[in-house]
Image (tube, rainbow, N blue to C red):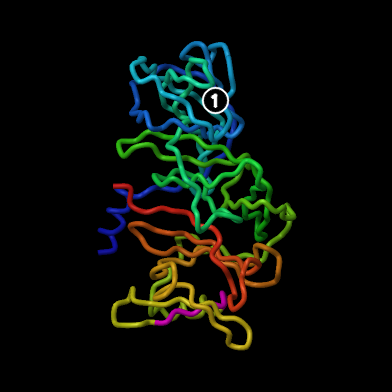
Amino acid sequence: MKNLIIAIQISCMVFLFGTNTANANSSSNTEPTNFNPSQNTVIAVSGLNLRTKPYSAGKIINKIPFGDQVEIIEDAPMVPDTLTSDYKYYYGQSSYSPRLSGNWVKVRYDGEEGYVFSAYLFYDWNYDNTFNKQTALLFEGSNCYENLHYRPDWHWYGVYQEGSATVLKKVKLSFFTEETELGAFLSIVTDIDAPSMFLFGTPYAYQSDRLLFSEYLGYEQPIYIGDSTNVELLEKASLEIKQISNNRYDTELYAVGRKGIRQKLSGAQTEFGPMTNLLWYGDLDGDGKMDYIIDFGEKAAHTVLFLSGKSEQGQLVKPVGVYYSGYCC
């Protein structure tokens, strides 16, 4: 059964690869890629060039800001192209630079007509009304879900392993799309030449280049209910799982504080279902208390950042940032 689940995940789920940002230059033409005209929102963080001709040497006549929408001129022919880049995808500690495949698409913006490269266009998105309002959680790599919780005026950080130390670094993010048979996947990259554990953004500045108390478990140490080794791990993270019935997924997750204070994080009367993995725990916001990143669900999963520094009365931690993932087909 476990191998079957893995096979399904490989064929239907998003693969998370690490990355890094930069410029793109024209390469040889390719076959036309899929393009949905509803992909009309600019995701180039520094702005997207509007050009007179459908190639990267075309004269720039305007720069369209991040988040602005263009009008796709649908009856105009698209010109397929592949651009090279110095982005980096990470798989473990190994990396490679992807080539950006897309189309030069004719658009109308601010009364002008010209061409833009479709790898920097994505679907319009709505910011999450419940989460990601004051702290947003992101991961490097590609995902079929619309995790564009980016605000240009926020501060953005990544958590990195440097030898035996965990370090918080300020990062610059970039976004591009990859066209697949399942539609457009959103890719997230940074300017740091190393794989990150996770990324987050906030309107408030954190002290960067500082050491963190941190334990990154990733997906190599999944939590299996009933495994005695997990009991010790959860105790170390100040967490507790309560089994509700004989169904191994029928559980409740609690954060445990001093003097026996407990807060239910998942289960009945909470926002989240059963925990599927404890991804990270440590002190992210520097208040000397536990913070968590926890996976909930599988087919439509929520990876949730809980911060102690944002907790309200009666809470130990508060869910503040959510990254969405799951099956893409």
Residue 207 position within the rendered picture, expressed as x and y whole percent measured from the top left: 74, 55
State how many labels appear: 1
Q: Quadrant of residue 316?
A: bottom right
Q: Quadrant of residue 286?
A: bottom right
Q: Amino acid at mark 1?
A: Ala
Magenta stretch holds residue 282: no
Near-viewer residue (193 or 270):
270
Residue at 37% across, 63% down: 297
Q: Is residue 44 left or right of residue 36?
A: right
Near-viewer residue (120 or 140):
120
Q: Is residue 262 above or below residue 41?
A: below
Q: Which residues are magenta?
A: 236-242
The residue to which callout 1 is attached is 24
Near-viewer residue (248 or 66):
66
Q: Residue furthest front?
A: 111
Q: Is residue 250 left or right of residue 200?
A: left
Q: Is residue 184 above or below residue 126?
A: above
Residue at 58% across, 30% down: 65
Q: Secondary structure at mark 1?
A: strand
Residue 143 position within the rendered picture, expressed as x and y whole percent measured from the top left: 42, 45
Residue 132 position within the rendered picture, expressed as x and y whole percent measured from the top left: 54, 54
Q: Is residue 297 above or below residue 59?
A: below
Q: Is residue 55 left or right of residue 4?
A: right
